[in-house]
Image: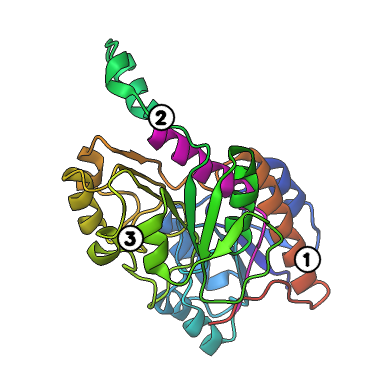
Amino acid sequence: MKPFIVVADGMDKHTFKSLQAITEFEVHPSPKVTQEELLTLLPRTSALVIRSASKVTAESLEISPNLKYVIRAGEGTDNIDKVACGKKGVKVSNTPGANSNSVAELAISLMINVLRKTAWAHATMVAGKWEKNKYEGNELSYKSIGFIGFGKIAQLTAKRLSGFDPDVLYYDTFPVKTDLPYARQARDLEQIFSECDIITMHIPKTKETSNLVDKRLLSLMKKEAILINTARGGLVNEDDLCTFLKEGKIRGAGIDVFAIEPLPEGSKLSTLENVVLTPHLGASTGEAQIRVGEMAVHQLKEFFIKNQLLNEVKA
């Protein structure tokens, strides 16, 4: 029997066609399914390719007796219960590096948007207003930029920022190798939050990092500093962030990821005038989705045809 492959959260159309053309596989005809549809497909699914929208839980694994392989089309795997997968013998992989450039560019875009107030100025223009004097901003050049986590995406972001002559300070709990001459390792998180003009998040969400940025760390930030999060929702305590933004204790924030997604209607974040919000767009570029899809298809072929497991992620 051929492995039955389900792509749950979308895939570049040309890459999906190439997957369908692999004669050794049976591929569900749609590259995107609802959660209700996915539940009906799981009992016969051999491999599942997901992005951030779908979750693999202990409960979903109970109705997936044929599931052997889950690919996270992206890097973060916090939407997959890897412990439960391990107990069931289900292998998990991601596609490291495929969306790094897109996430790095979005992080820089949010920095500029918050500093120059372009998103807010655009909103007033659409409303028929001309409020030039209200939106005097600041330059990105020569700023002190603090990185929480300094892995591949963070270092690529720092590299892309080189034309702005930044002073880069980073903190990571893991050993870091970098060839960036303008990057320095911080003593601790407190140094980052107290000294930097821009703080940008680049760590996974774990039990240890959940709500890492709370009122204690926010209280160390300069009044003119900004916070950027393109990493994972739940790293920043959103209630504490809202308080600091509303009271003007920090300049602003650019947030692409949230504790609950989609962002609930009426969220306090959406009422603030000094925060730029985007709906988890980090990997949402055509280029990234081609790379992610091609990696996922290659890994499926290696796993089922050559019995090779690439880019495994364990609990």
In percent of width and height, residue 234 lies at: 34, 63
The mark that comes first in sequence, 1 or 2, is 2
Vertical side of 19 occupied by 134: above or below: above
Among the 4 quarters of the image, the one containing residue 128: top left
Residue identified by numbered label 2? 116
Mark 3 sits on what residue?
236
Decide: is 20 above or below 83: above
Q: CA distance from mark 1 to mark 3?
A: 38 Å
Distance between mark 1 and mark 2 Cα atoms: 46 Å
Residue ranking furthest to the bottom: 87
Highlighted range, magenta: 91-116
Mark pair 3, 2: CA separation:
23 Å
What amino acid does circle 1 point to? Lys
Type of amino acid at the residue the image marks with label 3 = Val
Task: State the residue position of label 1.
Answer: 301
SS for callout 1 = helix
Residue 92: x and y in percent read: 60, 74
Please tell me how crowded label 3 is: few (under 14), some (14-19), or many (20+) other residues with Cα within 10 Å: many
Q: Is 63 on the left-hand or right-hand side of 99? A: left
Instruction: Indicate yes or no whether the magenta region holds residue 169.
Output: no
Q: Image point 27% across, 11% down: which residue?
A: 129
Query: Closer to us: mark 1 or mark 2?
Result: 2
Give the side of residue 96 with respect to residue 275, left or right.
right
Identify the main secondary structure in magenta.
helix
**SS assignment at label 3:** loop
Q: Give the image quarter of residue 94.
A: bottom right
Q: Residue at x 25, y 41 (%)?
A: 270
Is 99 magenta? The answer is: yes
Compared with 288, 84 (above or below) is below
Local crowd size for mark 1, using a 10 Å CA cut-off: few (<14), some (14–19), many (≥20): some
